[in-house]
Amino acid sequence: MSTPPVYTLAEGCPYADATTARRFSDGFPVKGLMLLQDTQLLETLAHFSRERIPEHIVHANAVGAWGEFEVTHDISHLTCAKFLTGIGTKSKTLSRISTVGPGAGSSDTVRDVRGWALKIFTDEGNQDFVFNDIPVFFIRDPIKFPSLNRSHKRHPATNITDSTMFWDFHAQNQESIHAVMLLFGDRGIPKSARHVNGYSGHTYKLTKSDGSSHYVKFHFKSNQGNATLTDADANRLAGEDPDNTKADLYNAIEAANFPSWTLLAAFSPSTMVPGLAPSADPSTAPSPHVCLPDAARYRLGANYQQLPCNRPVAPVYAPYQRDGFATVNGNYAGDPNYVRSALKPLSYRPSPPRHADAAVSSADARHDIWDSDEVTDEDIVQARMLFRDDVLGKREGQQERLISNVVSHLGKAKPVVWQAAFDMFSRVSPELGEAIRTAVVG
């Protein structure tokens, strides 16, 4: 038998008993006062008050599992993404299937849309997909997304689920009728997470290195079947076994009865639909992707990508995102934390070329403009006027003091940055740049 681990506090101090407390007592049966030097007690209580992060405003009641994505049909004629090409290619995945409106601890069998988030870990960066268990959504305009979810939650005054709120929203926003009918039909309550189909709420775009592209809708079909519950069965399970979906998936995995899904995809060349935005399909709504990382930052902090469940397989070098809570990646040590440093040059991957046959709308053309902050002579005009014609040029000694002050400060910097500074001042005035260079270099 292996040796049992030694119990310690969080900083490694061993304790004889995890239930002991240090007290002040005069020996009477009443145990007496607690003492502030009781490190174990204070650490235990302080951690207990902080061991729950805020629940997600939506998708708070969920079940998730690790898995793998395997390519069974090569589609390299449509995309250069390695994780989608090459029969037999496998990638690690993390899935989360949840209700949307109810909070943590609610029954797994409520009548509600099931959201499905899938993260595929690849050498090209993590790929995130969002699905629902019905093929359409309630809204088209993302500005309504918060209101939609509030109407499915609890009344702000009573904190009770409220049918009036639900129907008031949907009756006044009637683009939701298709999704409402699906929700209240047979597929409104899945039997378990293993029996959920996933339909992409977005139209995705696959590209190749030559610039050609295709729009695609992804559907995950459960190989266990799309089984559902009746209202009567759902209500019974809500009382008898409210966590039945979580237990079902856990037990299936424990028994090596691993669930699986088949990914189906419908493609259309982007040349067939010029100007179509990636979420322009009127049968779906653009579930706002921006909400998801923002919620993660609020709940987990700015470094949520460093957690094992979010950490990319691909190498990460993002030195302009550092510090803050839960920084566990070494924080880039002494590497520059500002852009365009000469101390540590970076390489960049160029944007893929546009395919010669692709139809380009005026909107697409505007979206392809990447504006770089390059300095032109216009940026130097006012500095040149300041040195030659304005305050510094007209007041005795000011040019000399400017040079002296710059030399004093620049001379303390590493020589690797000197020449760029000399060149910068030379753009203002060749004489200024040369005076500074001569004084610094000697």
Image: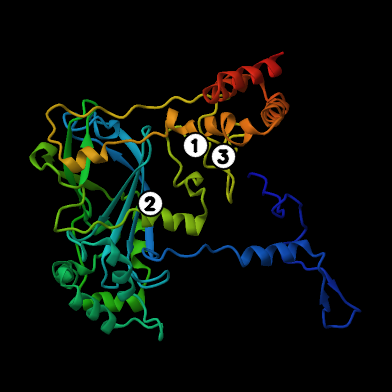
Task: Please report contact status of discs 3 and 1: CB closer than 8 Å, yes or no.
Answer: no
Q: Residue at x 90, y 79 (%)?
A: 27
Q: List the residue tagged with mark 3.
A: 329
Q: Residue furthest bottom?
A: 158
Query: SS class of the residue under badge 2?
Result: strand
Cα–Cα span, label 3 and label 2: 25 Å
Q: Is residue 267 left or right of residue 394?
A: left
Q: Earlier in the sequence, mark 3 or mark 1?
A: 1
Name the residue at 42% across, 36% down. Answer: 313
| Three-letter code for the amino acid on which mark 3 is drawn | Asn
Report the mark closest to the observer, 3 or 2.
3
Label annotation for residue 65: 2
Query: SS at mark 3?
Result: loop
Answer with mark 3 or mark 2, whichever residue precedes in sequence: 2
Q: To which quarter of the image does residue 187 belong?
A: bottom left
**Where's the N terminus, which quadrant?**
top right
Looking at the image, residue 95 lies above or below residue 98: above
